[in-house]
Amino acid sequence: MTQDKPGSGGKRPTPEELRAQVDETRQELGETVEALAAKADVKARAQERTGAVKRQLSDRTAHAKDRTAHAKEQLGDRTAHATDQLRQKATHAAHVVQDRAPAARRGPAPWIAAGGVLVALLLVRRARRRR
C-alpha cells in the first residue's frame, strides 16, 4: 500500500484509485476491529474453551468405557475357561475316587479327596464373587 506523495515527483493517483484505496483500507480496518473485539470478548473465549474441554472429556470417557467393556469381556472369558478346567479336574478326581473306592474304604483317603474337591470348588466360587 504505497502511495505517492504530492510533490515527490511521482504520478498522482486518480480519484477512482483513491476510492479503491479507501475501500480497501476500510475493509482491512473492519477485519482488524473484528479480530480485536473477538480477543477482547473473554466470555466467548471462555465458552469456546469450555466446549473444547467438554468434547475432549467426552471422548476420553467414551474411550475408557470401551476399554472397560473389552476388559470385562476378556475377564469373563478367562473366568469361564478357568471354571471349565476346574470342573474337568473335579470330575476327573471324582472318577479316580470312584475307581479306587473299594480299596480306599478302609482308610480316610476318600474323605480327604472329597474334601479337597469341595475346598477347590468353594475357592473358585469365592474368587468369582470378588470380581
Image (spheres, rainbow, N blue to C red):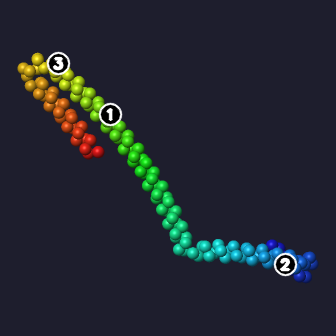
Q: Is residue 49 above or below residue 99?
A: below
Q: Is residue 17 above or below residue 56?
A: below
Q: Tag 3: Cα neighbours inside 10 Å, few (<14), some, or many (≥20)?
A: few
Instruction: Tell me which label, 1 or 3, sits earlier in the chain.
Output: 1
Secondary structure, mark 3, is: helix
Q: Which mark is residue 101?
A: none
Residue 17 quadrant: bottom right
Residue 93 quadrant: top left
The three-letter amino acid code for the residue at tag 1 is His
Q: In the image, is 105 to the left or to the right of 70?
A: left
Quickly name the residue at label 1.
81
- The answer to which of 85 and 40 lies nearer the viewer is 85
Residue 21 quadrant: bottom right
Name, please, the residue furthest toward the bottom. 7
Q: Residue 111: percent from the left, percent from the top? A: 11, 27
Residue name at image x 81 percent, y 73 percent: 1
Quickly name the residue at label 2.
18
Quickly name the residue at label 3.
99
The Cα–Cα distance between marks 1 and 2, rounded to whole angstroms, is: 85 Å
Secondary structure, mark 2, is: helix
